[in-house]
Amino acid sequence: MTDTDHAHPRGELALRTVAMPADTNPAGDIFGGWIMSLMDLAAGMTSRARAQGRTATAAVSNLSFIQPVKVGDVVCVYTTVDRVGRSSITLGVEAWVLRGGAASRQRVTAAEFVMVAVDDVGKPRPVPPEAE
């Protein structure tokens, strides 16, 4: 899959923020772990809404850093619910940026997140049927 395969974000906008100097690595680019944390937050918000309650990150796979993120970029994280199991929700998560006031977004990171619906003590619980 090339970056040209994704001219537009997949899914719903779940989170948007600005990359700041405190989030850089020694090379001056935004630290990949910061981007991953934004993606995890977005996956958590989307899965919490679908599960109608608390969820926890169970796995992250197919994580690809496609382009660096720069200070001042507006980072937009999009999510899609790809599969719902008994207690798990698999999401596609993509981070896109708006650079320097440009109107067009560029995809910078993509991954698959598996979130598990959990009860008040952290044990897996069933995901309720989708609301009509």
Image (cartoon, rainbow, N blue to C red):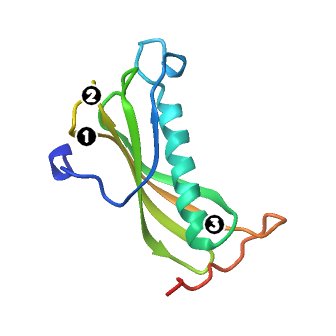
The circle on residue 116 is: 3
Camera-side residue: 1 or 115?
A: 115
Circle 1: residue type:
Arg
Circle 3: residue type:
Val
Contact flag, marks 1 and 3 (Cβ < 8 Å) = no
Residue matched to label 2: 101
Camera-side residue: 59 or 6?
A: 6
Circle nearer the N terminus (2, 3):
2
* Camera-side mark, 1 or 2: 2
Residue 75 in the image: state x and y as whole percent. 40, 36
Residue 56 in the image: state x and y as whole percent. 66, 58
Circle 2: residue type:
Gly
Alpha carbon of mark 1 to alpha carbon of mark 2: how far? 10 Å
The circle on residue 32 is: none
* Camera-side mark, 2 or 3: 2
* Camera-side mark, 1 or 3: 1
For mark 2, does the 10 Å Cα neighbourhood hold few (<14), some (14 to 19), or many (20 or more) residues? few
Asked if 64 appears above or below 30 in the picture, the reply is: below
Q: Residue furthest right?
A: 121
Alpha carbon of mark 1 to alpha carbon of mark 3: how far? 30 Å
For mark 1, does the 10 Å Cα neighbourhood hold few (<14), some (14 to 19), or many (20 or more) residues? some
Instruction: Report the residue at 62% width, 82% height from top.
Output: 128
Circle nearer the N terminus (1, 3):
1
Residue 104 in the image: state x and y as whole percent. 21, 39
Instruction: Report the residue at 64% width, 72% height from top.
Output: 52
Alpha carbon of mark 2 to alpha carbon of mark 3: how far? 37 Å
Residue matched to label 1: 105
Residue 114 in the image: state x and y as whole percent. 54, 61
Instruction: Report the residue at 49% width, 66% height from top.
Output: 90
